[in-house]
Image: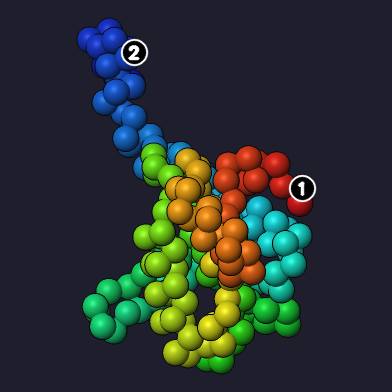
Amino acid sequence: MSDLLRRTTEPGAAWAAARQSFRSQVLGPAFEEAAFYSAFPMLRARGVDVSSHGWTLVYDPATRTTHEVDLVGLASGSDAFPTGTRVTVVGEAKATERPRGLKDLDRLRHIRALLSKDHDAAIAALVIFSLYGFSRSLREAAADSADEILLFGLDDVLSWKG
């Protein structure tokens, strides 16, 4: 902005320089927040038993890494996350400039398996929110496993009625 105000750069050049920061620091978090707040009514409309939801970190002892999970949904009657809790949803929201694909699905399956060590999560639905859509292979996988894989795009997130 200071370069624009001093007129030392053109608007197109300023946008080109700021675009990535805008996407990662503004657009991405805004989409994730919109997806998070629209998730509950959209999942319930699809018949998913979810009474509360939030985000969590899941430790992977094999790789000594932690996975951030944008959305973890708990079954009816659950409002805390102690050992043994029934997890009904594991999901993520992505605003990166590419359609989400099978790699994203594999990641969620891995996280669900990690959660299943301490929780009742083996059949939790896998949910992906994407600002830029989904690959054909992911859409086909979701069509073949409609009870396991749920995909929500920008239109879904913006049109929910909560």
Q: CA distance from mark 1 to mark 2?
A: 37 Å
Where's residue 137, x and y in %?
A: 45, 53
Residue ID at (39%, 42%) = 98
Where's residue 85, x and y in %?
A: 59, 87
Which one is closest to the eye, mark 1 or mark 2?
1
Residue ID at (44%, 72%) = 109
User: How many other residues sit within 10 Å of disc 1, few (<14), some (14-19) or many (≥20)?
Assistant: few
Which mark identifies residue 114?
none
Residue 54, compared with residue 20, is above or below; it is below
Left/right of residue 25 with respect to residue 90 in the rendered view: left
Count of number-bearing discs: 2
The three-letter code of the residue at mark 1 reads Lys
Q: Label 1, on which residue?
A: 161
Q: Specify the quadrant of the image occupied by residue 82.
A: bottom right
Q: Quadrant of the N terminus?
A: top left
The three-letter code of the residue at mark 2 reads Pro
- SS class, disc 1: loop
User: How many other residues sit within 10 Å of disc 2, few (<14), some (14-19) or many (≥20)?
Assistant: few
In this view of the protein, which residue sits in the foreground, 121 or 10? Answer: 121
Q: Are marks 1 and 2 in contact (CB under 8 Å)?
A: no
Residue 12, compared with residue 159, is above or below; it is above
Residue ID at (58%, 42%) = 154
Residue 77, compared with residue 20, is above or below; it is below
Where's residue 106, x and y in %?
A: 40, 67
Q: Label 2, on which residue?
A: 11
- SS class, disc 2: helix
**Residue 53 visible in image:** no
Left/right of residue 134 with respect to residue 4 in the rendered view: right
Residue ID at (29%, 10%) = 10
**Residue 87 visible in image:** yes
Q: Specify the quadrant of the image occupied by residue 81.
A: bottom right
Which residue extends farthest top?
7
